């Protein structure tokens, strides 16, 4: 998979791809990243990339010509044929479709992704209409530039490429995992899967020491009972999702057992359905 990033601050990306999973993916030939300086595609002495907004108002707007030329330089397929060729040009924008794990999964199918980083008041709208295939926002807030968004989109998509993570199941069985993962977990039945997927948040993880500043690791995790561990993890994922992101429960794939656990969580404390399975310590909501 290849990413091209077009920016007025190419230095922003210095070092950013030289760590961890991204670095290994590049070294392993699974990922290529090229950063392009937008000013290389200007033709005036001052290398001008911005101008005042038509209609007045504060700030400057990135001009369309350098951005269009920068994308043309990449020799992609014509806009109408790009999707079929596995290519996409993304304009980072607070006005875009919200980026999510589902969008990252979609992007990980592409062969080539071009990321256009806006600055100032934004980008001339004709870039959106004529050059970009989609507008993506990384969240409901306004950044000063598209560079952080480009790095976020690249990182989230590239780690979903087969072979990038040591174990491909890691990217399938984690927070926001695909909804059919629950079924696959059941079929696989092993403890490699996290039981937090299926659209839920991940369950809490623990490592040594068994006790840290008075807090013990939940006993069930040392029990060796795989079914109890599976159930505990699933319940913790449900509990965390209910607490932090109840909106996700609407689309999550829930079993009858999950639903009954959630009902018990919402029941008055100490009631007949209060959850008591597996979690011996450190599991308060
Ligand atoms: N006037 C714009 C608005 O209100 O939507 C904000 C422009 S912002 C200061 C400058 C650039 O930062 C944008 O062109 C875009 O590339 C980037 N940017 C800002 N917020 C973003 C977000 N939430 N997601 C992705 N890119 C963002």
Image (cartoon, grey):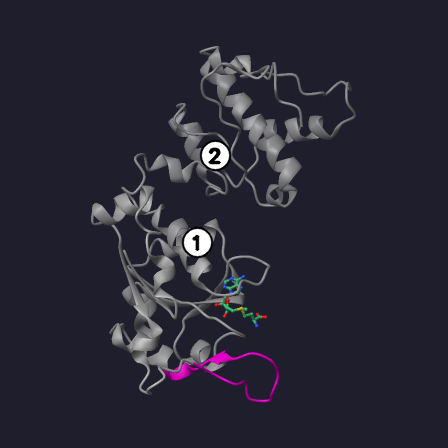
Number of numbered discs overlaid on the protein picture: 2
Q: Nearer the viewer, residue 263 or 99?
A: 99
Q: Earlier in the sequence, mark 2 or mark 1?
A: 1
Q: Nearer the viewer, residue 106 or 185?
A: 106
Q: Which mark, residue 283? A: none
Structural crowding at the residue carrying mark 2, measured as other residues with C-alpha within 10 Å and reported as few (<14), some (14–19) or many (≥20): many
**Residue found at the far top of this picture:** 223
Which residue is rendered at x = 44% and y = 11% of the image?
224
Q: Can you tell me whether the CB of the residue at mark 1 lies under 8 Å from the nearest atom of ligand 1?
A: no
On the picture, is 236 further left or further right than 157? right
Q: Which secondary structure dominates the residues rendered in magenta?
A: loop
Structural crowding at the residue carrying mark 1, measured as other residues with C-alpha within 10 Å and reported as few (<14), some (14–19) or many (≥20): some
Q: Quadrant of the N terminus?
A: bottom left
**Kind of element beneath mark 2:** helix
Q: Is residue 232 magenta?
A: no
Q: Which mark, residue 152? A: 1
Which residue is rendered at x = 27% and y = 41% of the image?
163
Q: Considering only vertical position in the picture, is 111 above or below 257?
A: below
**Image spot of residue 67 (x, y percent):** 37, 77
Q: Which mark, residue 182? A: 2
Q: Nearer the viewer, residue 187 or 57?
A: 57
Marks 2 & 1, CB-CB < 8 Å contact: no
Q: Which residues are magenta?
A: 50-65
Gap between marks 2 and 1 measured at Cα: 27 Å
Q: Considering only vertical position in the picture, is 179 above or below 69?
A: above
Q: Is residue 60 magenta?
A: yes
On the picture, is 229 further left or further right than 22? right
**Image spot of residue 237 (x, y percent):** 56, 31
Q: Considering only vertical position in the picture, is 186 above or below 129?
A: above
Q: Nearer the viewer, mark 2 or mark 1?
A: 1
Which residue is rendered at x = 32% and y = 58% of the image?
110
Q: Can you tell me whether the CB of the residue at mark 2 lies under 8 Å from the nearest atom of ligand 1?
A: no
């Amino acid at each position: 998979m290849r990413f091209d990033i077009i920016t007025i601050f190419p230095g922003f990306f210095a070092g950013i791809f030289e760590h961890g999973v991204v670095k290994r993916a590049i070294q392993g030939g699974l990922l290529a990243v090229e950063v392009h300086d937008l000013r290389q595609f200007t033709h005036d002495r001052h290398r001008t990339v911005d101008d005042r907004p038509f209609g007045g108002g504060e700030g400057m707007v990135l001009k369309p010509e350098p951005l269009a030329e920068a994308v043309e330089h990449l020799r992609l397929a014509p806009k109408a044929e790009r999707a079929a060729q596995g290519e996409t040009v993304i304009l980072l924008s607070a006005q875009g479709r919200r980026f999510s794990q589902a969008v990252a999964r979609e992007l990980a199918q592409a062969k080539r992704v071009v990321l256009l980083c806006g600055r100032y008041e934004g980008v001339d709208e004709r870039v959106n209409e004529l050059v970009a295939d989609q507008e993506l926002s990384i969240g409901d807030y306004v950044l000063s530039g598209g560079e952080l968004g480009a790095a976020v989109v690249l990182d989230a998509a590239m780690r979903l490429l087969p072979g990038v993570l040591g174990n491909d199941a890691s990217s399938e069985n984690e927070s926001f995992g695909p909804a059919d993962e629950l079924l696959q977990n059941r079929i696989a039945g092993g403890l490699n899967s996290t039981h937090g997927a299926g659209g839920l948040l991940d369950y809490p993880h623990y490592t040594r020491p068994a006790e840290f500043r008075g807090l013990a690791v939940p006993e069930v995790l040392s029990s060796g009972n795989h079914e109890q561990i599976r159930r505990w993890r699933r319940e913790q994922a449900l509990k965390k999702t209910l607490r932090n992101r109840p909106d996700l429960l609407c689309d999550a794939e829930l079993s009858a057992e999950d639903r009954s656990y959630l009902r018990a969580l919402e029941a008055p404390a100490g009631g007949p359905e209060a959850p008591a399975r597996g979690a011996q310590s450190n599991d308060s909501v």
